[in-house]
Image (cartoon, rainbow, N blue to C red):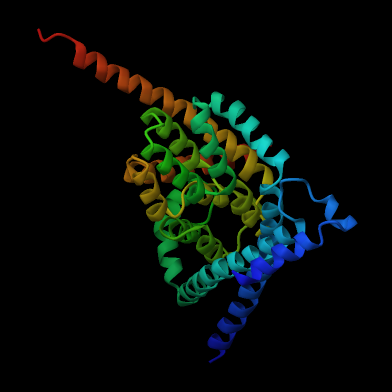
Amino acid sequence: MDAVTGFLRAFIEGAGDLALRMFVIVVPIMVVMEVLEGTRPFRAFVRIWARLVGRWLGMSERAAAPTVIGFLFGLAYGGSLIVRDTRRHSLRRRQVFQMSVFLSMVHAVVEDSLIFVAVGASAFWIVVYRCAWAAAVTVVLGAVAVAFVERQRARRSRPPV
Amino acid sequence: MTETRHGDTGEEGRGPEPGAAVAAPGSGPLRADVRRGLRAGLVTFWDLIKMMVPAYFVALLLERLGVIDVLAEGAEPVMSVLGLPGEAAVPLVVGYVLNIYAAIGAMQALALTAQQITVLAIAVLIGHNLLVEGVVLQRAGMNGVAFGVLRIVAGLAAAGVANLLMGVF
């Protein structure tokens, strides 16, 4: 009996603490995002940023826009944009690969990161370090994939001996 | 639907008043944005809590029943490389299968230091919700399974490197 009440008390306290932290983080973010999204400076920022970071990560300008959306708001948004653009045949396979690697390492950077900061994680490590890690993995895997494809192509085009 | 209509015409009607002139041209009325944000925030909050609280309940129950001790012992060798206790494998696995909210719920049942929370956060933030997000990547023409493996491996590696670096600085 004592164990049960102890468990219930711990659960109620822990769940209340969790709910409060989430509420304080999630609701204000959503308001700020909603207000920001529609503003012209914000859209201009996304475009410029897409161009700068995208080139760095081996992405075309077309690939950079869904990447920024996914980076900021989540894989569901970015991913569905990638799916849509792939359907329209405007994206090369290599572009989709670069975007997928980068976004699978880091996405929804604002909300997901803040939620972990709310429970005590260091903002520097989970934002700055993780972005640097994602960029490094994207560049390295991109190079590996290119080398692999080139080799396949070379093997295929070699005349049979 | 009707409610939004009312709100929109209301803002338009108030247009000539001095307060409304502050809103940037082309962007929606600020007050409507805030209201939409509040609604989205509350809906999202509720979605997350629906996920986190049950996960926390199960994790706490498993901990009290001693199940986590058994699991933790098995995971100890891998977790110790990351500077984490064996029981930290629970939020990690919960995160892989479900999502980061459930992982945070499971984390809440453990006593971790600030550094351990950060290291665990890195692993979970890189690898989570692998089934659902794997489907998204699959639909984009990638190999969902390979990306799942990549995220687990890269997430653990990133966490391990971060743990080492944090020890240095």
To which quarter of the image does residue A48 belong? top right
Q: In the picture shown, does residue A48 fall above or below A22?
A: above
Q: Position of residue B22 (x, y in %)?
A: 84, 50
Residue B109 visible to an observer of this rendering: no
The residue drawn where x is 76% and y is 56% is B30
Q: Position of residue A88 (x, y in %)?
A: 38, 37
The residue drawn where x is 57% and y is 48% is A73
Of all residues shown, which one is farthest toward the bottom? A1
Residue B4 visible to an observer of this rendering: yes
Q: In screen coordinates, is B143 left or right of A50?
A: left
The residue drawn where x is 41% and y is 31% is A90
In the rendered view of the protein, which quadrant contains the N terminus of chain B? bottom right
Q: In screen coordinates, is A71 left or right of B75?
A: right
Q: In the picture shown, does residue A142 fall above or below B14?
A: above
The residue drawn where x is 48% and y is 40% is B157
Q: In screen coordinates, is B115 left or right of B102?
A: right
In the rendered view of the protein, which quadrant contains the C terminus of chain B? top right
Of all residues shown, which one is farthest toward the left? A161
Q: Position of residue B124 (x, y in %)?
A: 51, 51
Q: In screen coordinates, is A143 left or right of A74?
A: left
Q: Position of residue A59 (x, y in %)?
A: 49, 27
Of all residues shown, which one is farthest toward the right? B18
Q: Nearer the viewer, residue B97 or A159?
A: A159
Give the number of marks: 0
Q: Nearer the viewer, residue A127 or A56?
A: A56
